[in-house]
Amino acid sequence: MTIATNADQDRVIIFDTTLRDGEQSPGATMSHAEKLEIAALLDDMGVDVIEAGFPVASEGDFEAVADIARLSKNSVICGLARANFNDIDRAYEAVKHAAQPRIHTFIGTSPLHRDITALDMDGMVAKIHDTVSHARNLCDNIQWSPMDATRTEHDYLCRVVETAIKAGATTINIPDTVGYTAPRESAALIRMLLERVPGADAITFATHCHNDLGMATANALAAVEAGARQIECTINGLGERAGNTALEEVVMALRVRNDIMPYRTGIDTTRIMQISRLVATVSGFPVQFNKAVVGKNAFAHESGIHQDGMLKNSETFEIMRPADIGLSATNLVMGKHSGRAALRSKLADLGYELGDNQLKDVFVRFKALADRKKEVYDDDLIALMQDSATNAEHDYLQVRKLRVICGTEGPQEADLTLAIEGVDHSIDATGDGPVDATFNAVKMLFPHGARLQLYQVHAVTEGTDAQATVSVRLEQDGRTYTGQSADTDTVVASAKAYVNALNKLILHKHRGNLSELMQTAG
Ligand code: KIV
Ligand code: ZN
């Protein structure tokens, strides 16, 4: 991997925190296997640094970071730690397996955060010195962050940054933790630190922006223009509250507007759609249709004038080509006569490289879909792949069989067979409509205290035989869990989405609460 040095001033390091800050989004809990799959793709597509998790948070987080560290080929693997020796030791234990490990330690430096920690300014400086020195004794690659930097007094920010550099930090990250800054201010802050802090020219400055006011991408790019050379970002902008800077946005902005922002990244942009779909599926956070770069409509041209212009010269209305981000140009229709080789090649076009066993399984699902639906479009295949990823063989709960009776004469009825840890259980339940009856049946077979917060249905394509993708969000103890599924039968998709959310809740019960840990940070 090539990391920017002073001799390589236009190279911007891409630091992806989908698996740490992204996973902190309420409801975005990911399984161990899902984290490994995302990390492998990030590593493959040229992400320089992967923040793989917060190892002290739970045994599950630790194992995920350690396995990602063991398996990474190119990327630096980073683990987060609060400003205490125990967190730092745990982070190092997890990342040490990587060819290139990094510890990222942080403390809240703004007046609000200092109040919470009951440390005065001098006390905090001493703590930063001790913890960064401790980390540096374990590992050569140390990142340090003054959390809430954009609301920290400038003089004090200079003092703590200088302390961290002297104690051995190699990257200083400047987080806009609450998404409060604006582009001009973001740039001025980096410039001020570069000018005033002794030793600043020997380390890399990073920018970490949250998107509360919709300015995360602009703030990150402004910081780069001022001298920051690492952008912290997540796929699809996933992250706490309104999310983080979106990787696809900064990478494509630097590529498309290289004329005015002459910086480069090491990202293979043709993998962007693939990673975007994977993250949307496993996090259960669908990408908004008009999302920049990766939204379903980002390359759609509806109006007559636009379509006419596109046919004559695509540059009239397109600043990037779909292929640049890995979108296939054609939407070839597949059907029940399409063979395995055609399916493999179509899925490869869509960014899914399948092994023989996986293809066998997906082919069976594809045939079942093609039997029910005359024409199978790209979006159908994507939904099918996402469904295979979210409803897996080894899940704690699995929908085996469902029959519903519905119509004008109520009450509607659902006859459900659910496998719980591999053992089938069946029940009949009634409800106010088929979905309500189905959810009641799930609840009777697997009683739980989670509250349904959101139930949402989207048609994947047009026509009455279209597949429906269903999202279900459950809430328990202040935490949310989002499940998704797709099927031509909306009620079946609903049952599977509900069960998918419950599986995530069950998974989370074995883990600590990240948000609580973050609040005690510093
Ligand atoms: O937003 C933030 O301040 C963070 C820190 C842990 C870097 O995520
Ligand atoms: Zn953050």
Image: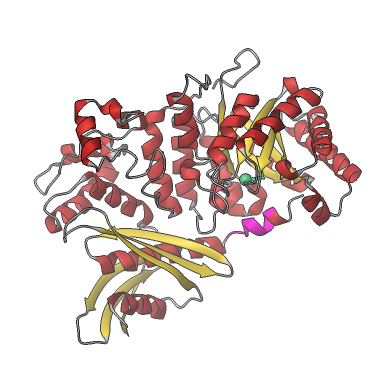
Q: Residue furthest left?
A: 337
Is residue 102 visible from the viewing direction of this image?
no
Residue drawn at x 8%, y 46% as measured from the top left: 337
- Is 349 located above or below residue 499 in the figure? above
Magenta stretch encompasses residue 138: no
Magenta stretch encompasses residue 512: yes
Q: Quadrant of the N terminus?
A: top right
Colouring: secondary structure
Q: Is residue 314 left or right of residue 137?
A: left
Please state the horizontal and vertical placement of residue 406, each as a whole percent of the image. Answer: 21, 80
Q: Is residue 231 left or right of residue 235?
A: right
Q: Residue furthest front?
A: 305
- Is 383 located above or below residue 294 in the figure? below
Please state the horizontal and vertical placement of residue 512, each as a whole percent of the image. Answer: 62, 59
The quadrant where residue 400 appears: bottom left
Please state the extent of the stretch shown in magenta in the rendering.
Answer: 511-518
Please state the horizontal and vertical placement of residue 159, each as a whole percent of the image. Answer: 84, 34
Q: Is residue 11 left or right of residue 170?
A: left
Q: In which of the image's four quarters is ligand 2 placed? A: top right
- Is 339 located above or below residue 407 in the figure? above
**Main secondary structure of the magenta stretch:** helix
Relative to the observer, which residue lies in front, 15 or 237? 237
Please state the horizontal and vertical placement of residue 280, each as a whole percent of the image. Answer: 41, 49
Relative to the observer, which residue lies in front, 404 or 247? 247
Residue drawn at x 64%, y 33% as measured from the top left: 184
Residue drawn at x 50%, y 55% as measured from the top left: 28
